Image: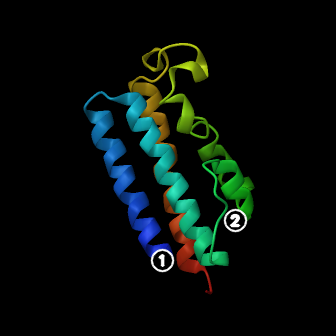
Amino acid sequence: MSTPRDWMEKSKRELAAAQNLGQAGFYAEACFWCQQSVEKALKALLLLQRSGFPKSHSLRELADAAGIFGEIKEYISDIELDYAATRYLDVSGVPTDTFYDAKAFQKRLAAAKTATEMIEKWMKNSKR
């Protein structure tokens, strides 16, 4: 059975993958992995809090379930939609390269790093 620590380690690997993809100029793909990193971190926290989590890719839903949406909202708002918008051309109606550029990637990477660091800190301070 996977542990909260396993999920947090996966989160960190996905954040590193995002950074590598962004450095290579694959911005949409990098933004997807930023979203995935935060998703895994939230699931780690939920697993610690309640031994499970909703089957969802929605960062808002996961943060709500963990009781931290208000505290993390500003960091996840931009990357919330990146689960689908980075992968499916018909989500936004325009090619992903149109709006996933170096600037968008840097913003999302910074937000994902901050969010995952906050979540990890909450996990360390948890009494469980």
How many other residues sit within 10 Å of disc 2, few (<14), some (14-19) or many (≥20)? some
Above or below, 73 against 95 in this view is: below
Quarter in which the C terminus is drawn: bottom right
Circles 1 and 2: CB distance less than 8 Å? no
Identify the mark nearer the N-term, 1 or 2. Answer: 1
Q: How many marks?
A: 2
Q: Is residue 14 left or right of residue 41?
A: left
Could you classify mark 1 by the number of other residues whose Cα lies within 10 Å: few (under 14), some (14-19), or many (20 or more)? few
Tell me which residue sits at (29%, 27%) in the image: 25
Residue at 46 percent across and 39 percent down: it is 32
SS label for mark 1: loop
Residue to which mark 1 is pinned? 3
Which residue is painted at 50% across and 58% down in the image? 40
Query: Residue 74 versus residue 8: which sits nearer the camera?
Result: 8
* Quadrant assignment, res 6: bottom left
Furthest toward the bottom, the residue is 127
What's under tag 1, amino acid-wise? Thr
**51 with respect to 95 (left or right):** right
In the rendered image, residue 31, in percent from the top left (x then y), is placed at 45, 36
Whole-percent x, y for residue 109 in the image: 44, 42
80 relative position to 108: left or right: right
**Considering the numbered disc 2 on the image, is that residue within a helix, a strand or a loop?**
helix
Identify the residue at image location x=39%, y=37%: 30
Residue 66 circle label: 2
In this view, the residue in front, 90 or 43, is: 90
Disc 2 residue type (three-letter): Ala
Q: Nearer the viewer, residue 59 or 78?
A: 59
